[in-house]
């Protein structure tokens, strides 16, 4: 196990670049299974989730390389092999191979995926979408087993699920005719997958809307650059605001964070947006929001709720937090309480944060990927030296977060045990 040791109180200054999006890279890696050829992906983040997913592709017979942010996947010899439960249980995103394997080979068998600590996440939306395309469900208590030749259909999603939408789109590009997907997720990483599939030869209309029209074609391996990680961008911006620093966060797409910028402006943060960067400036007093409520895109991202709530501990007044998506997402608030934050947890989805409060160093843990990042942000402004354990969660989703923060002047050290 490794830990971060953070000495709080340092003002961050300078420039930093955001890495490629984890949430876009994983479905795009899965989509490389659709074609007989070598796909090349650039701006891929060097994080543990990517390496785990590459291992899954190799189990399926693909050959992969990864160097300096560039991944190649040769799926010429890929086959619908059963993936060991030991691999699948490491990450929820392993479910993303369902659509491409089923679409290309006509059958897929996968152990129930794990790796999620945000409450129960059903696979029902995935099964519903793939069944609508003609997949037959082979009953099993041990795994997910689907087979059949897919045909175009009208799919009304049971929920605006990101990964279920991605599986539906990847399966639909292999079916004859046009498939309509209604109530599709609209997140930037879903859009990036669709753009990758279009570059492979598919026709997809309505990208970025809840209604997609998908038409398969002759798909070919291609070269593609992954979109920047808007969640990492938001986290680094919050680090700058929290420490009252002057920081330029580069290699971002600001339009992916409209709701975030709106909330940041409302609390009194000072920043300027350019075509591909955010320039954060020192600010005066910060004011609490009436409510911070998460929603599916383009609403406020659930993955930035925990990091933003750290900022709320420094705002004058009380903010009501309403996490609408995951019942386990507020667990990190117990860690902030240990650091002295004024928090009232009302139920698994709602809490209040009152500030401003001087946070104090304490031994704390990462509850999940985004909560882990929130703990790092809290440690940056805490009085004293904070020890953060279970940082394996953080390293699943953030590429070299400690190194990037050190470049800006943070005192953060990674300790291997």
Image: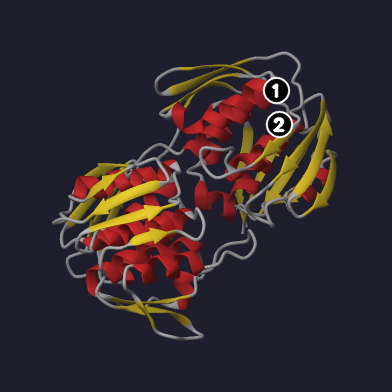
Closest to the observer: 59 or 144? 144
Task: From the image, tell me which residue sits under label 1.
Answer: 267
**SS for tag 1?**
helix
Q: Is residue 385 above or below residue 114?
A: above
Can the viewer see residue 7?
no
Count of labels in the image: 2
Residue beneath the point at 25% across and 43% down: 224
User: Where the C terminus falls, by quadrant?
Assistant: bottom right
Identify whether 391 is placed above or below 145. Answer: above
- The image position of residue 203, as x and y in percent, is 22, 48
Residue beneath the point at 60% across and 45% down: 302
Disc 2 or 1, which lies upstream in sequence?
A: 1
Q: Residue 88 location, x and y as percent?
A: 46, 70
Viewer-nearest of discs 2 and 1: 1
Residue wearing tag 2: 311
315 horizontally vs 192: left or right: right
The residue carrying pointer 1 sits among few (fewer than 14), some (14 to 19) or many (20 or more) residues within 10 Å by Cα, namely: some
Seen in the image, is 49 located left or right of residue 247? left
Task: Say whether residue 407 is visible.
Answer: yes
User: What whole-number distance in Å separates the C-alpha atoms at marks 2 and 1?
Assistant: 9 Å
Where residue 339 appears, as percent x and y from the top left, is 82, 41
- Determine contact: label 2, label 1, CB under 8 Å: yes
Mark 2 neighbour density, 10 Å: few (under 14) some (14–19) many (20 or more): many
**Horizontal and vertical percent for residue 236?**
56, 32
Question: Is 109 drawn above or below residue 187 in the view shown?
Answer: below
Residue at (59%, 43%) from the top-left corner? Answer: 295
Q: Quadrant of the N terminus?
A: bottom right
Using the rendered view, name the quadrant where residue 275 is placed. top left
At x 64%, y 27%, the residue is 263
Asked whether 224 or 18 is in front, the reply is 224
Tag on residue 221? none
């Amino acid at each position: 196990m490794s830990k971060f040791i953070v000495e709080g109180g340092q003002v961050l200054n300078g420039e930093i670049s955001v890495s490629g999006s984890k949430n876009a890279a994983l479905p795009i890696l899965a989509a490389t299974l659709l074609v007989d050829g070598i796909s090349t992906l650039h701006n891929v983040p060097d994080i543990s989730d990517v390496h785990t997913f590459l291992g899954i592709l190799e189990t399926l017979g693909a050959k992969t390389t990864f160097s300096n942010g560039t991944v190649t996947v040769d799926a010429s010899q890929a086959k619908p092999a059963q993936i060991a439960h030991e691999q699948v249980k490491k990450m929820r995103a392993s479910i993303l191979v369902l659509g491409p394997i089923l679409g290309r080979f006509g059958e897929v068998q996968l152990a129930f995926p794990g790796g999620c600590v945000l409450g129960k996440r059903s696979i029902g939306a995935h099964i519903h979408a793939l069944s609508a395309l003609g997949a037959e469900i082979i009953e099993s208590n041990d795994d997910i087993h689907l087979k059949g030749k897919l045909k175009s259909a009208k799919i009304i999603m049971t929920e605006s699920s990101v990964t279920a939408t991605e599986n539906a789109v990847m399966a639909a590009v292999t079916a004859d005719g046009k498939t309509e997907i209604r109530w599709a997720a609209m997140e930037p990483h879903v859009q990036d997958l669709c753009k990758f599939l279009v570059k492979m030869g598919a026709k997809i209309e309505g990208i970025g809307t809840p209604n997609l029209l998908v038409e398969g074609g002759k798909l070919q391996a291609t070269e593609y650059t992954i979109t920047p990680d808007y969640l990492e961008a938001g986290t680094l911006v919050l680090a700058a605001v929290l420490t009252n620093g002057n920081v330029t966060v580069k290699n971002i797409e600001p339009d992916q964070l409209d709701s975030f910028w709106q909330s940041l402006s409302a609390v009194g943060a000072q920043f300027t947006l350019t075509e591909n960067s955010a320039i954060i400036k020192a600010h005066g007093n910060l004011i609490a929001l009436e409510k911070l409520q998460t929603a599916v895109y383009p609403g406020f991202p659930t993955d930035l709720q925990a990091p933003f709530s750290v900022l709320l501990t420094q705002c004058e007044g009380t903010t009501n937090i309403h996490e609408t998506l995951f019942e386990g997402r507020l667990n990190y608030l117990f860690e902030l309480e240990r650091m002295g934050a004024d928090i009232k947890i009302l139920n698994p989805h709602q809490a209040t944060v009152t500030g401003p409060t001087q946070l104090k160093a304490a031994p704390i843990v990462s509850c999940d990927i985004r909560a882990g990042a929130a703990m790092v942000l809290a440690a940056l402004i805490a009085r004293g030296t904070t020890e953060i354990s279970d940082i394996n969660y953080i390293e699943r989703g953030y590429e070299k977060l400690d190194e990037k923060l050190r470049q800006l002047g943070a005192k953060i050290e990674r300790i291997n045990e």
